[in-house]
Image: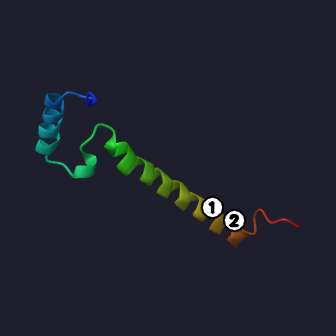
């Protein structure tokens, strides 16, 4: 007894032809791939650079020390 596929084979072949025809990088072919591949890492890098810069500024000026 075989299980029915999640999607019809014709639909999968259609998607495969579409994605193979796009002239972009493989990791940017999907609809939301730019968000996961570009925006989230850029936001993490920007926030970490900001926090590191603020920490260096506070250390150099002696701000936020506990007594």
On the image, the x and y values in percent for residue 9 come to 16, 31
Return the residue at label 1: 54
Which residue is nearer to you in this view: 22 or 58? Answer: 22
Look at the picture and state if 49 lies above or below 40.
below
- Quarter of the image with the N terminus is top left
Write down the quadrant of residue 3 in the picture: top left
Q: Within 10 angstroms of label 1, few (less than 14), some, or many (20 or more) residues?
A: few
Residue at the farthest front position: 1
Write down the quadrant of residue 8 in the picture: top left
On the image, the x and y values in percent for residue 17 come to 11, 39
Asked if the residues shown at circle 1 and circle 2 are in contact, with their CB atoms under 8 angstroms apart, the answer is: yes
Q: Is residue 31 left or right of residue 63?
A: left
Question: On residue 26, which mark appears?
Answer: none
Question: On residue 58, which mark appears?
Answer: 2
| Residue occupying image coordinates x 32% and y 43% | 33
Q: Is residue 56 left or right of residue 21?
A: right
Q: Mark 1 to mark 2: distance in Å? A: 6 Å
Residue at the farthest right position: 67
Scheme by which the image is coloured:
rainbow
| Residue occupying image coordinates x 21% and y 52% | 25
Look at the picture and state if 50 lies above or below 28.
below
Q: In this view, does 14 lie to the left or right of 64?
A: left
Q: Within 10 angstroms of label 2, few (less than 14), some, or many (20 or more) residues?
A: few
On the image, the x and y values in percent for residue 44 come to 49, 54
| Residue occupying image coordinates x 37% and y 43% | 35
Write down the quadrant of residue 54 in the picture: bottom right
| Secondary structure under the numbered disc 2 in the rendered image | helix
| Residue occupying image coordinates x 26% and y 27% | 4
């Amino acid at each position: 007894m075989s299980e029915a596929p999640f999607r019809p084979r014709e639909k999968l072949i259609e998607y495969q032809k579409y994605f193979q025809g796009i002239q972009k990088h493989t990791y940017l072919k999907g609809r939301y791939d730019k968000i996961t591949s570009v925006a989230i890492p850029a936001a993490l890098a920007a926030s970490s650079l900001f926090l590191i810069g603020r920490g260096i500024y506070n250390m150099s000026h002696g701000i936020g020390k506990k007594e």
